[in-house]
Image (cartoon, grey):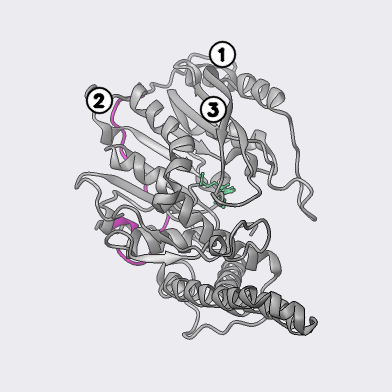
Amino acid sequence: MSKKKIPKIVNPNEDEQERLHFLRIVSAFNYYRIHSLQRVTKTETYLAALPANHQALLADYKGHLRDIKTCIERNHRIIQLIIKDVAYMFENVVAPPEPVTVSPMPGVADLEKVQATLKQFVRDWSQEGAAERQACYQPIIDEIIANFPPDQCVPTNIRVLVPGAGLGRLAYEIARRGYTCQGNEFSLFMLFASNFVLNRCRGTNLHKVYPWVHQFVNNLAAAHQTEGVSFPDINPAELPSDAHFSMAAGDFLEVYTDNDEWDCVATCFFIDCANNIVAFIETIYNIIKPGGLWINLGPLLYHFSDVPDEDSIEPSYEVVRDVIQKIGFTIEKEEKNVRTSYAQNPRSMLRYEYNSVFLVCRKPLTASLQKNEVESGNQSSFVTTDCPMSPRSPAPPVDGFRDSGFDSTVNSASSAVVCPTSKE
Ligand SMILES: C[S@@+](CC[C@H](N)C(=O)[O-])C[C@H]1O[C@@H](n2cnc3c(N)ncnc32)[C@H](O)[C@@H]1O
């Protein structure tokens, strides 16, 4: 692989913060087993205190709790594989000593994120997640193909960015179709797991997770809670030899500051992850080349809404739509009530469904010209811009995954990476 290294100017305090953040997330993964087993033990203890005749009636349930513990042990084994080599994932993080010391006890929120990460394998990398991906990812992929037809352009010249890439399947699928694609993600939970699946899994259905084992309510049958899900459903290593695929770690707003860089930005269940959604839309607009596309699908869940110590605004879709146009986008396609789900347990008695919005927005070809006119007080400083399908060289990486990682194994062109200091 071409491992380009660009020296990073590091604020020593920031580096220490990043190291502590890294250790905190590793610690959460390490505590998964203890934390999850404690939950079962609590139920077992209560069960053991019930009248003998009630316990007799619940004999099967007692056995089920034992099964749950087995599933937790199996998840723990996968987790150990996930975090096995993360110490060497980023160049700009000091590797923790092995074995990692895991105190203090991580917070409940972090521990729940470990459990959520397990569910994400279903959405992105299992056969069981196929319908969800069909609803969420396929419209985006179809739109990219329709706008950049592979027989009418050189797909590797089309640069697509997927911010908030999660476990990377959408970005991977776009790269699989020949486009140059970069996923961006700031959560170490997601980055550890995507590193594992993209760089360590060589084959199909190699592992099994038990994603629903932490859902103690709304189970129709005990077996639904302890059901295993195999992954990956396809071999992540099987990308065309000329595919360009990379994952970039870091806050979207901080990593992508160069204007007019991307032919297409594809966001799925992402824009509502912002404290300030306007900043996301503005950045998306700035980094797209004039004439380029923003494709979005998702709800407005507003992840920071009512989160203590977090700022949040929650404008309605009507307002967001207005902002999108005022920022400069032309809305070319808009579908409301697109029925979608997110890491949904298919057999649960409780289901969440989002009536998502699907949007295709274009940055006008004249955008740079207009911007220049504004900045220079209408002086004629014309900036030439490429049309969406013209070749552009990839942005230089900021820093890289330490191992051959996302690069060599998936033949990606570069791995632009900054160490994530996320809000997780
Ligand atoms: C709801 S998930 C969606 C993941 C994926 N797109 C999917 O559809 O499965 C949103 C993702 O965006 C990531 N994210 C949120 N804010 C981000 C930011 N400022 N920069 C990079 N990633 C971010 C989160 O960590 C999370 O993995």
Please tell me whether mark 2 or mark 1 is closer to you in this view: 2
- Secondary structure found at label 3: strand
Front residue of this view, candidates 43 and 363: 43
Is the residue 378 above or below the residue 141 in the image? above
Q: Residues within 10 Å of mark 1 (few under 14, many from 20)?
A: few
Earlier along the polypeptide chain: callout 3 or callout 2? 2
Is the residue 382 above or below the residue 229 in the image? above
According to the picture, the residue beneath numbered tag 1 turns out to be 378
Q: Amino acid at mark 2?
A: Cys
Q: Amino acid at mark 1?
A: Asn
Q: Amino acid at mark 3?
A: Phe
Earlier along the polypeptide chain: callout 3 or callout 1? 3
Q: Residues within 10 Å of mark 2 (few under 14, many from 20)?
A: some
On whether residue 62 falls in the magenta region, the answer is: no
According to the picture, the residue beneath numbered tag 2 turns out to be 153
Is the residue 216 above or below the residue 268 in the image? below
